[in-house]
């Protein structure tokens, strides 16, 4: 590793550690995942085609188990490279359910890859088609005669677009993205009820970074961070430290900011494990321990992950850690 790469790696590591000192980070915004470092395509179209082989992955999150109406989120990703690894293509399907809302979206990503020094810069664009639906029969009404919820359900189809930059080198990565550029209107009752209140899907900006550190021949550490920002809301962030043992067993611990301004100790402490079952198949699971006042109302959050590489079997001579 040359001195320039070492300086960049140390600077990125210092940035990740420095985020721990921020005290104004709070609030969950978009769908979130504890194993975010293995689900980058959901947030950044620039990641498309960054894997060695065509890759199919799926992640399912059951948040705040035992709390009625709590978020349940699933995402399925596929990405591959084309044109001698100069182009990446990706496809993501996401389902998010919170209370009576049912949210489906499909994201088609394109990334153009530019070799730079020891790494690759990917410029990504994506088209998004989203169905936002509310099943009013699942809502608990405070006023039983509320005419604004007289129908069984209502929905909207919302087109959108996103962009992202992603740079990856052998020992670190960094990216920034805006998955949805347009601020779609989410009003579902505007044809039935006159109101001055407008519900918008606000733009979200995501920043991600990670560093790979060799500790011993069979032990590596990988600090990582995911930062989430939306206008007029506090910044949110997940901080993670992963230990990689013999390239096959991954174990990580995370801290998520936010959760409560009253308690002020964060949203959750999270742990995950993953195991490389074969050269092409990896599985994992995560558990979030709630730190906010909701702690007494739920039994934690569970998340399950699986990824499969579509390539010929054989020993991995150059395993990828990002």
Image (spheres, helix red, strand yellow):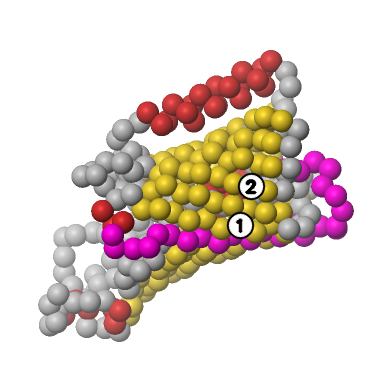
What residue is drawn where x is 34% and y is 63%? 298
Provide the residue designation for mark 2. 250
Please, what secondary structure does the residue beneath circle 1 have?
strand
On screen, residue 181 above or below 60: above
**Horizontal and vertical percent position of residue 322:** 65, 42
- Report which quarter residue 55 is drawn in: bottom right
Question: Would you say residue 127 is visible in this rendering?
Answer: no
Q: CA distance from mark 1 to mark 2?
A: 9 Å
Question: Which residue in the structure is indicated by mark 1?
Answer: 284
Looking at the image, the residue that sits furthest to the top is 3
- The magenta-colored residue range is 296-320
Vertical placement of residue 137 versus 89, above or below: below
Q: Position of residue 321 (x, y in %)?
A: 68, 42
List x then y, in percent, for residue 68: 31, 71
Residue 163 vs residue 311, the one in the foreground = 311
Q: CB atoms at circles 1 and 2 under 8 Å apart?
A: yes
1 or 2: tag closer to the N-terminus:
2
Residue plotted at (43% across, 42% down)? 255
Please say if 58 is above or below 49: below
Q: In the depicted view, which residue is nearer to us: 246 or 257?
A: 246
Q: Is residue 273 magenta?
A: no
Work out whether residue 220 or residue 23 is closer to the camera in this orientation and state it: 220
Marker disc for residue 158: none
């Amino acid at each position: 590793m040359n001195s320039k790469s070492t300086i960049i790696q140390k600077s990125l590591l210092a940035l990740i550690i420095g985020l721990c000192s921020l005290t104004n980070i709070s609030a969950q915004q978009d769908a979130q995942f504890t194993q975010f470092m293995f689900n980058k395509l959901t947030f950044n179209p620039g990641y498309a085609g960054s894997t060695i082989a065509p890759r199919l992955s799926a992640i399912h999150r059951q948040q705040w188990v035992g709390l009625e109406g709590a978020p349940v989120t699933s995402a399925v990703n596929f990405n591959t490279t084309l044109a001698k690894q100069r182009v990446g293509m990706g496809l993501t399907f996401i389902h998010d359910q919170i209370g009576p809302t049912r949210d489906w979206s499909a994201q088609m990503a394109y990334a153009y890859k530019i070799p730079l020094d020891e790494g690759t810069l990917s410029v990504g664009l994506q088209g998004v088609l989203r169905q936002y639906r509310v099943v009013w029969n699942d809502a608990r009404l405070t006023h039983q005669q509320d005419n604004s919820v007289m129908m069984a359900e209502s929905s909207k189809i919302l087109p959108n677009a996103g962009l992202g930059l992603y740079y990856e080198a052998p020992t670190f990565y960094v990216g920034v993205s805006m998955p949805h550029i347009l601020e779609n209107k989410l009003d579902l009752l505007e044809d039935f009820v006159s109101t001055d209140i407008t519900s918008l899907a606000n733009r979200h900006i995501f920043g991600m970074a990670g560093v790979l550190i060799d500790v011993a021949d069979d032990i590596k550490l990988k600090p990582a961070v995911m930062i989430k920002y939306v206008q007029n809301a506090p910044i949110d962030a997940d901080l993670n430290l992963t230990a990689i043992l013999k390239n096959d067993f991954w174990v990580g611990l995370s801290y998520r900011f936010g959760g409560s301004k009253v308690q002020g100790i964060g949203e959750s402490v999270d742990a995950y494990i993953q195991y490389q079952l074969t050269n092409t198949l990896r599985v994992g699971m995560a558990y979030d321990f709630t730190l906010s006042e909701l702690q007494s109302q739920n039994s934690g959050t569970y998340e399950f992950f699986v990824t499969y590489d579509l390539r010929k079997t054989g020993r991995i001579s150059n395993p990828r850690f990002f």
